[in-house]
Amino acid sequence: MAESGSVGQRHHQVLIVGGGSGGITVASQLLRARPGLDVALLEPSSVHEYQSGWILAGAGLLPYEQTHRPEAAVIPGGASWIRDSAAVFEPEAHRVVTTAGATLSYDVLVVAMGLQLNWSAIKGLPDGLGSHGIVSNYSHPHIRATWEAIRSFRGGTALFTHPATPIKCGGAPQKVMYLADDIFQGTSGVGVNSRVIFCSALAKLYPVKAYNATVERIVARRGIETRLLHNLIEVRPEEQVAVFEVRSEGSEPALEEIRFDLLHVVPPMAAPDVVSHSPLAIEGPGGWVEVDKDTCRHKRFADVFALGDVSSLPTAKSLAAIRGQAPVLVANLLAFLDGAPLHARYDGYTACPLITSFHSVVMAEFDYDLQPVSSFLVDPTKERWSMFLIETRLFPWVYWHRVLKGRLHESRFLKPFKPLVRALGLARKEPCPEPRT
Ligand SMILES: Cc1cc2nc3c(=O)[nH]c(=O)nc-3n(C[C@H](O)[C@H](O)[C@H](O)COP(=O)(O)OP(=O)(O)OC[C@H]3O[C@@H](n4cnc5c(N)ncnc54)[C@H](O)[C@@H]3O)c2cc1C
């Protein structure tokens, strides 16, 4: 990997904007498939984050050191790193202008910039974050304080929120709540007198019917109150009051105030402004990069692809989804460079592993049809200790050593069992080689 400044004009065969989970995975897979390809990564940060590890690390289930590495250590050999950020997309001219003023042109552009957290869409935030019991695992600098607040909670009302927008890892707002509830109930010591309330702007606890049934059982067993269609719009830190806009069928939205002693906030999310204000954006809320749901290619600009959180791919945003998207994008990008038809298809595969206690996980995998699928030989709707071990022990290793190295396209270690898994109706589909009709 060669690091370079960015002033002036440069051209690359493949320009990848964003060196997070999606960008690095694609760069690695491209260079494994075609060594010598001219691949450049435009990424401003010196640190690469394993965001899936943030909740684990905060809860003491993973050492903090395993949640981040220097960016230079994850960029694959053969790729050049442009340490700068995208400021303007000019897809008609096949170029990106950077914050430092460089102009980068490309044969193919891959947008993998993740999403932005819109804290200021909630009145009183982000200023109130970190004070008066207001915490969040979605803000890296606040993770340690979040867990300190949970561990030192002396009782009262603990609110956990889920916003109205798509978010990264739809299960994360609940994972932190179940772990916190274990701590409040004194699983490893003396419990406290707590009232736990989950306030979600959505109409269901989980978008997939089979997993929703599991989650409903879990909250009932734990005695957690659920308030659906409750969207957090304001926090008054000094009073420790959260204000929700409550929707109900056939009537105007109403406001409801809930007093809290602890408030875990998950803010609304959208594509970064530089994307949503560009010609790449889809019309309407979110401003995501408008790609075809099967090929990951832009609907209007043939030399632009996108994956991960920034894309409009209509599935739950997660690292697991990137595992399904990257090989499809790479196959189609190489086909495009060769002037061949784009045959690889993404089936919407995603997963939001739900940590439901300090010893169980529901490995919630599903596809575009919102059908449960499993990369493992088990019923994915059940809480399992085996999946807890996989999520907490195996996945971090797999991330650093397989995913980012471009070596994990499929669960290869399960390949010999695939026919059996398929026969049981559990297997995820392979990216299909021919276009669907
Ligand atoms: C608390 C939490 C828990 C999670 N748990 C799980 C889980 O258990 N399982 C799971 O599958 N997923 C989980 N996720 C989601 C997962 O981490 C994300 O979906 C995944 O990281 C998305 O990858 P990405 O490449 O799209 O974006 P990111 O990994 O966020 O990378 C985006 C990159 O773009 C760069 N960038 C931003 N702006 C610019 C710019 N202007 N120019 C150039 N570069 C730019 C950023 O610096 C960053 O490096 C979790 C996320 C969080 C926050």
Image (cartoon, rainbow, N blue to C red):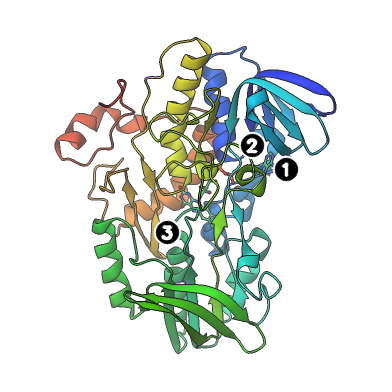
Foreground residue among 252 and 338:
252
Q: Amino acid at mark 2?
A: Gly
Residue 14: x and y in percent read: 62, 21
* Dot 2 crowding, Cα within 10 Å, few <14, some 14–19, many 20+: many
Q: Are marks 3 and 2 in contact (CB under 8 Å)?
A: no
Query: What distance separates the C-alpha of mark 3 from that of mark 2?
Result: 24 Å
Q: Report whether the residue tagged 1 is closer than 8 Å to ligand 1.
A: yes
Labels 1 and 2: the sequence-earlier one? 2
Residue 236 screen position, x and y as percent = 63, 83
Question: Which image quadrant for residue 418?
Answer: top left
The reply to whether residue 187 is in sight is no
Q: Secondary structure at mark 1?
A: loop
SS class, disc 2? loop
Crowding around mark 1 (Cα neighbors within 10 Å: few <14, some 14 to 19, many 20+) is some
> Where's residue 286, x and y in %?
53, 51
**Which badge, 3 or 1, is on the more N-terminal residue?**
1
Q: Residue at x 47, y 35 (%)?
A: 291
Q: Is mark 3 within 8 Å of ligand 1?
A: yes
Residue receiving disc 3: 171
Contact between marks 1 and 2 (CB within 8 A): the answer is: yes
Mark 3 vs mark 1, CA separation in Å: 26 Å
Kind of residue indicated by mark 1:
Ser
What residue is pinned by disc 2?
A: 19
Mark 1 lies on residue: 45
Q: Amino acid at mark 3?
A: Gly
Number of numbered discs on residues: 3
Residue 109 showing in the rendered view: yes
* Label whose residue precedes the other's in the sequence (3 or 2): 2
Q: Is residue 233 above or below residue 391?
A: below
